[in-house]
Amino acid sequence: MSILLSGCWPAAEQQQWLRLLQEALPGEQWWLAPPSDASEAAQVELAIVANPEAGVLQGLPNLRLIQSLWAGVDRLMQDPTLPPEVPLARMVDPAMNEAMVHTALWAVLALHRGFFEVQTQQHQGLWRQPQQLRAGEWRVLVLGLGELGGRVAQGLATQGYAVSGWSRRPADLIDVQTLHGEAGLVQGLDAADSVINLLPLTEQTRDFFNAARFAAMKRGASLVNLARGAHVVEEDLLAALDSGQLSRAVLDVFRQEPLPSSNPFWRHPRVTVLPHCAAQTDARSAAAVVRANVLALRAGQPLAHLVQRQQGY
Ligand code: NAP
């Protein structure tokens, strides 16, 4: 099989992916840029991509699968030249899922126990013990109950937190209060001490966290955004923090990345900035995920983790 591997990444990262993918799929022909020769381009059946340059997937008439190495495909789907009829699979990597659960647990634990404030107090030389609530007295709302959100909700419930989760369709998760629809959202936002965003970025969810949504949250609640920067209207978040409507924000993702040095989030006393590191694809386990989908393609079996293009995720 002739395979195109394309992404916006440093050369060293590309080489690491190539090595692991070649080990997982030995004996294939690999291209790191689309072949310029039409007959060679006609042989490319698989594109393995990591947010490639727009237009890279044009002119491959026999492409049978586009396999993303990243979980979110919002940027990829903005490419107007993305072949509409070719199945698009996103990455669901067990190691990345686990890392996301760890990040969410860290954030919720620090919020619930007041450890972010304690860290600030250290810089001020202040000795002040925070109130100690039980985990069951801290309600967390997880927005999005997919591969990541579902696991995060379940992981928090296992630690004893009171967990609610909101998704597009009704869901059923052990020890998690599941909500859907606008009424479910209002109910969930009103009750949550911490809200974790793990929605995909789609037309429906862009600018999701705006002034109205912050006003619908419980006063003094916190936001943990682990999904996409464009979910949040940054000026509205700053206003909600400055008015005390929100007590803190833990932000892993931003409208512009890397976060410009002029962005006020860097210096805001109640914002924790993470450099988009909540959960990264682990090339070692992801190569096995790609291999499984390639074997399914060859065998004519159903492909895993296909994106529903009309829904945008
Ligand atoms: P997923 O499996 O596709 O799950 C998406 C969830 O969101 C589903 O539960 C879906 O509801 C729900 N949803 C979608 N649109 C909705 C809407 N309009 N209203 C209510 N619920 C809606 O996605 P995932 O793998 O969990 O990943 C989620 C996102 O995390 C990715 O798209 C990516 O942007 C982000 N991410 C961030 C990092 C990081 O390091 N910060 C790493 C990986 C991924 P249904 O269940 O009803 O379909």
Image (cartoon, grey):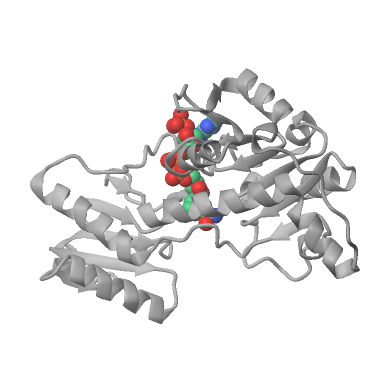
Q: Is residue 118 left or right of residue 66?
A: right
Q: Is residue 159 left or right of residue 114?
A: left
Residue at figure coordinates x 63%, y 68% from the top left:
258
- Residue 313 visible in image: no
Query: Picture coordinates of residue 167 (x, y %)?
Result: 52, 29
Classify 181 as above or below 50. above
Q: Nearer the viewer, residue 119 or 74?
A: 119
Residue at figure coordinates x 90%, y 43% from the top left:
243
Q: Nearer the viewer, residue 116 or 306?
A: 116
Q: Quadrant of the C terminus?
A: top left
- Residue 151 visible in image: yes
Q: Is residue 271 left or right of residue 183?
A: right
* Residue sticking out furthest to the bottom: 12
Q: Is residue 103 left or right of residue 273?
A: left
Residue at figure coordinates x 36%, y 75% from the top left:
14
Q: Nearer the viewer, residue 268 or 123?
A: 123
Query: Picture coordinates of residue 144 (x, y %)?
Result: 52, 36
Classify 188 as above or below 282. above
